[in-house]
Image (tube, rainbow, N blue to C red):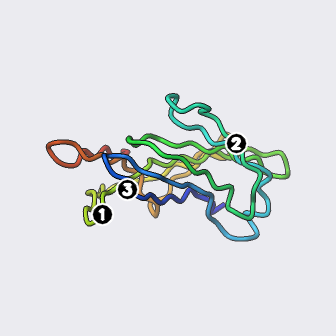
Amino acid sequence: MSLGIAQDSEYAGKDYWKWRAWIEGKTDELLKVEKVKWFLHPSFTPSVIVSRERASGFRLEASGWGTFLLRAELRLVDGTDVTLRHHLEFAKPNDTPPSCSAARTCSTASSSASWSESEPCSASRRTAGGWMTVCAS
């Protein structure tokens, strides 16, 4: 399966971002997804959100100041569960965070795990001293 989490963000000022995440993939694969359960950082209320809106890519919209590991549990129409993970990334206008040379995204389907080198998996945050970036190994 080539499904993954995509994300964009908009700087709202004062180190605060509006952001969106959704599931991207081939149309025939998206048609196999019944619903997506999004798991946000525990500081969000609610921290678990369910979307059944396939037309929007099961879009999630939120806002906040920090990055974290976003998790999505996909329930497929055949009853199979697939878990996707993505580190949110924020950048101020005209400011690009550094990237990891060996960044990865993990996709777990049932009991097997597969890695994809195509999607970056780094958490970046602007600090007083510059960018702080954590890379998955």
**Residue at the outermost left position:** 129
How far apart marks 2 and 1 lie (CA) works out to: 39 Å
- Residue 108 is situated, as x and y percent measured from the top left of the image, at 61, 45
Q: Are marks 3 and 1 in contact (CB under 8 Å)?
A: yes
Q: Are marks 2 and 1 in contact (CB under 8 Å)?
A: no
Q: Kindly identify which residue carries mark 3.
A: 11
Q: Quadrant of the C terminus?
A: top left
- Residue 105 is situated, as x and y percent measured from the top left of the image, at 48, 52
In the image, what residue occupies the spot 37% across and 46% down? 16
Q: Kindly identify which residue carries mark 1.
A: 93
| 41 with respect to 54 (left or right) | left
**Residue at the outermost bottom position:** 27
Q: Residues within 10 Å of mark 2 (few under 14, many from 20)?
A: few
**In terms of sequence position, does the residue under pointer 2 or pointer 1 come before the other?**
1
Tell me which amino acid carries mark 3: Tyr
Q: Residues within 10 Å of mark 3 (few under 14, many from 20)?
A: some
Query: Quarter-wise, where is residue 93 in the image?
Result: bottom left
| 83 with respect to 127 (left or right) | right
Tell me which amino acid carries mark 2: Ser
Nearest the camera: 135 or 50?
Answer: 50
Tell me which amino acid carries mark 1: Pro
Q: Kindly identify which residue carries mark 2.
A: 110
